[in-house]
Amino acid sequence: MPYSRATDIPPQLTRMADGTIKQRNPFSDTEVWTVPDRANRPIGQAPLNPKPINDHEAHCAFCADRILETPPEKARITREGEDARITYGTRVDDLAEPWEFRRVGNLFEIVSYSYWQKNYGYAMPVSAQKRMENYLADPAGRAHVLAVARAKALAAHTSDEQWETMEEFDRLQMAQPFFGGCHDLILARRHFIDGATDDSQLASAGTLTPTEHEWYTRLTVDAMRDLYDQNRYAKYVQVFQNWLRPAGASFDHLHKQLVAIDERSVNARLEAHKVRANPNYYNEAAVDYAGYQNLVVAENKNAVAIAGFGHRYPTLEVWSRSSACQPWEHTPDELRDMSDLLHAMHAATGVHVPTNEEWYCRPIDMDVPMPWRVLLKWRVSTLAGFEGGTKIYVNTIDPWSLRDRVVPQLLELRAEGKISQNIHIATECSCRVNSLRYNPNLA
């Protein structure tokens, strides 16, 4: 029978007589089925044959001892007492100083620097140009930049001979994206947890402390704001995190990515029509509906987490309750509350579950209020011919089963002090209606 209580929104969860649960995503209209007897399999298991590690800080190109393999830093966040601070324009001599998270340009951009140049006449901002000039004026900085540019050229099938015959001016032109590009990485310091002895003991978002995760989030939000500021042609900055290779990660090293694009996202375009028709749509179709179905997993003052519905993969959703639509417009408390709930969802998910973390925000040129939300998708199944042919997706874990997997983990993690103590879990949550304050009509 249908579960919807909203009179003007089609049913989003329907349980059939045989136990099949049909789901509809209220924003994309994606259709998803969860079929009985396909959900009872273990997920997120540790590798069967973990290998000893002797190179905690040099395991991959994102590790601290291989810092010269990544482009020059745009920014970093470092501990300062009980808190941390963001610094910009790191010099090459500063790279050896302690850090927690770093922001660098992506060596292999999705939307390239030349894309912006050739299609829009984009020019590197003056601040980035000065930083590049200062970095190259230092012989060690110049050597760093040329070494990374060479590695990128060789990976793109430039031969050693071609590189050696190239003029230095042309080599340095290849380094411009390192300073003025619009696809960035936020790199975590650890590859493995402190004291790890084998390569199964990875440092994920969930193994950070709540405070460290807030620093990670803070630097990401700062980078997001900066990409909009530096590129006036960017309409949207997509933030995402691929964790583990099955989820698309090149390295099993914690990092986020930010990519500026020149269009509104497809999701935003689809949602805009629905929100213009019903400005309270995000409350009614998502968080309030989840409350009616007992799918609210956790909450704090400024954010709420639910077991999502209508997704191709099991998905936890974290919604901001701030009246501000953009992450960088949030107050420190609002940002911390979003970070704390997201951190808790990662911790409850576990280190060995491949995940995609996706941020959804209002495009910079859109007038429709849209709350910031983050989806954490568990990549525990493979799409196949049935999905491709029908566009009906089989998700092996229904929202209630997802809730029942996550809630006990959250309770245990909170009792152990591994997640924020200010989080209310499951039946402790208020489930109050219209808790998302993005809608000015509710002010």
Image (spheres, helix red, strand yellow):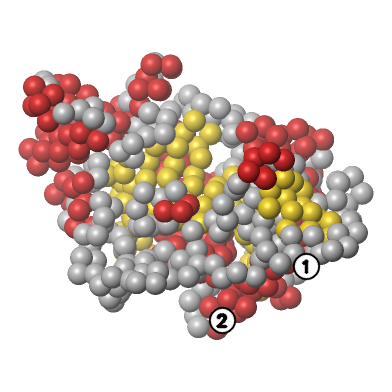
* Residue beneath disc 2: 412
How many marks are shown on the rendered structure? 2
- Of all residues shown, which one is farthest toward the front? 385
Against 137, residue 400 (above or below) is below
Crowding near the residue tagged with mark 1, few <14, some 14–19, many ≥20 C-alpha atoms within 10 Å: some
In the displayed structure, 387 sits above or below 35; it is: above
Amino acid type, residue under disc 2 in the picture: Glu
Q: Secondary structure at mark 1?
A: loop
The quadrant of the rendering that contains the N terminus is bottom right
Task: For marks 2 and 1, give the CA distance.
Answer: 20 Å
Quadrant assignment, res 415: bottom right
Given residues 441 and 179, the one toward you in this image is 179
Q: Secondary structure at mark 2?
A: helix
The residue drawn where x is 40% and y is 69% is 47
Q: Is 205 drawn above or below residue 260 in the view shown?
A: below
Residue at (44% x, 42% y) in the render: 258
Q: Position of residue 102 (x, y in %)?
A: 32, 51
- In the depicted view, which residue is nearer to us: 79 or 319? 319
Q: Residue at x 71, y 62 (%)?
A: 398
- Image disc number at residue 431: none
Q: Position of residue 370 (x, y in %)?
A: 67, 42
Image vertical order of residue 401 relative to residue 94, above or below: below
Instruction: Answer left or right for 240 relative to 67.
Output: right
Q: Where residue 197 sits in the image (x, y, percent)?
A: 28, 76
Residue type marked 1: Asn
- The residue drawn where x is 84% and y is 60% is 15
On the image, numbered disc 1 is attached to which residue? 294
